[in-house]
Image (cartoon, rainbow, N blue to C red):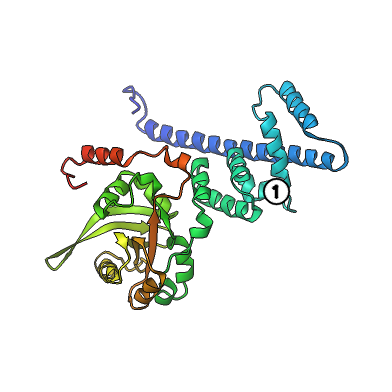
């Protein structure tokens, strides 16, 4: 906190705060300009290499020499390693459409993002799909890599749901935003035998990752959210808010296999939230049932008989490669941390 001398103007702190904000905004704009210029430079270097290789014997030996000469000429720049020069060539080869590179989704990402897209994906349409979402959602490189590893493109909008039937006109787009199947909970560090209360605790402990896995635009409202219905007490496992569609999202967790009666409880919670919490300006509440496994036909029958807009998704802990999973905390470490934060959690 800024401490002022007695003879300083009263509005100095307000002015200083405003100026700090202006400096940070200018720094952000400058960084974006620099990043765009670097992406454009790397693409042009790659394109030059491709053009030469089409008519001249520009093999690996020439590229190795090129990397050395560029480093010698520009020692203050760190981007001219042998590996990076090869990445530039690959970058220009895959982003070879008619539009300038700076006007593509890739042109709005950092070079590290683009290297991840090159190394993790072989399909250019998928690269564009992930690049577009990385820009829209502000993903870091690690988040982008996680989404690629867990095949987000195949999970988005794939959960069984009745959203279009219950919310005509908006259900299809809403399903793309909230109906992901399966959800990948590797980061919780739990096992398949974990019960609902352990899952809730672990999700709360790692809420940022939990919300990211549900999808962009989710915010946390509460865990074991209490509803008092004329003296009857009910508790929602997780109550979230989907900011882009301006609606509450009720999440119920079931560790085992899906049963039709699970949707009866979720129906009730969605109806209660609509009546007790939802404001007139807000969109209708939806429910997500998260279960360990499901019979698709059973789920479809149950959804057809549900009056509220619902989706049913499964979860897994086994989606990441073994080396990725090895970096996650063990179930014992998660449980110990939970007990430290919640000494009365003896049932974990």
User: Relative to the observer, which residue lies in front, 22 or 49?
Assistant: 49
Residue 251, given in percent of the width and then of the height, sits at 32, 60
Residue at the extreme bottom: 305
Residue 309, given in percent of the width and then of the height, sits at 37, 71
How many dots with numbers?
Answer: 1
User: Relative to the observer, which residue lies in front, 207 or 101?
Assistant: 207
Asked if residue 328 shows in the view, the reply is: yes
Which residue does the image show at 17% across and 44% down from the upper left? 346
Q: Looking at the image, is 43 positioned above or below residue 176?
A: above
Q: Secondary structure at mark 1?
A: helix
Q: Quadrant of the N terminus?
A: top left
Residue behind mark 1: 94
User: Relative to the observer, which residue lies in front, 15 or 70?
Assistant: 70
Residue 41, given in percent of the width and then of the height, sits at 71, 37
Left/right placement of residue 115 relative to residue 209 reads right
Q: Looking at the image, is 193 positioned above or below residue 1?
A: below
Image quadrant where residue 85 sits = top right
Q: Looking at the image, is 35 positioned above or below residue 133?
A: above
């Amino acid at each position: 906190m800024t401490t002022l001398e007695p003879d300083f103007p009263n509005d100095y702190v307000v002015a200083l705060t405003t100026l700090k904000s202006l400096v940070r905004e200018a720094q952000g704009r400058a960084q974006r300009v620099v990043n765009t210029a670097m992406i454009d430079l790397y693409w042009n270097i790659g394109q030059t290499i491709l053009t030469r290789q089409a008519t001249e014997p520009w093999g690996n030996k020439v590229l190795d020499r090129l990397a050395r000469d560029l480093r010698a000429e520009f020692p203050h720049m760190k981007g001219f390693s042998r590996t990076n020069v090869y990445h530039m060539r690959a970058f220009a080869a895959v982003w070879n459409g008619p539009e300038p590179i700076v006007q593509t989704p890739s042109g709005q990402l950092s070079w590290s993002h683009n290297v991840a897209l090159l190394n993790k994906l072989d399909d250019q349409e998928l690269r564009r799909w992930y690049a577009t979402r990385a820009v829209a959602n502000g993903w870091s490189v690690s988040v982008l890599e996680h989404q690629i590893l867990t095949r987000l493109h195949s999970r988005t909008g794939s959960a069984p749901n009745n959203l279009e039937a219950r919310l005509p006109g908006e259900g299809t787009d809403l399903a793309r935003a909230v109906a992901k199947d399966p959800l990948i909970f590797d980061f919780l560090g739990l096992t398949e035998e974990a019960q609902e209360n352990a899952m809730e605790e672990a999700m709360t402990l790692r809420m940022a990752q939990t919300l990211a896995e549900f999808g962009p635009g989710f915010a946390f409202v509460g865990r074991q959210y209490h509803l008092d219905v004329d003296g009857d007490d009910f508790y929602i496992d997780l109550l979230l808010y989907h900011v882009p569609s301006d609606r509450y999202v009720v999440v119920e967790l079931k560790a085992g296999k899906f049963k039709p009666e699970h949707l009866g409880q979720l129906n009730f919670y969605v109806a209660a939230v609509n009546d007790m919490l939802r404001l007139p300006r807000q969109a209708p509440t939806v429910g997500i049932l998260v279960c360990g496994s499901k019979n698709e036909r059973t789920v479809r029958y149950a959804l057809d008989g549900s009056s509220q807009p619902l989706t049913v998704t499964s979860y897994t802990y086994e989606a990441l490669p073994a080396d990725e999973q090895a970096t996650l905390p063990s179930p014992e470490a998660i449980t110990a941390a939970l007990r430290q934060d919640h000494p009365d959690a003896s049932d974990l």
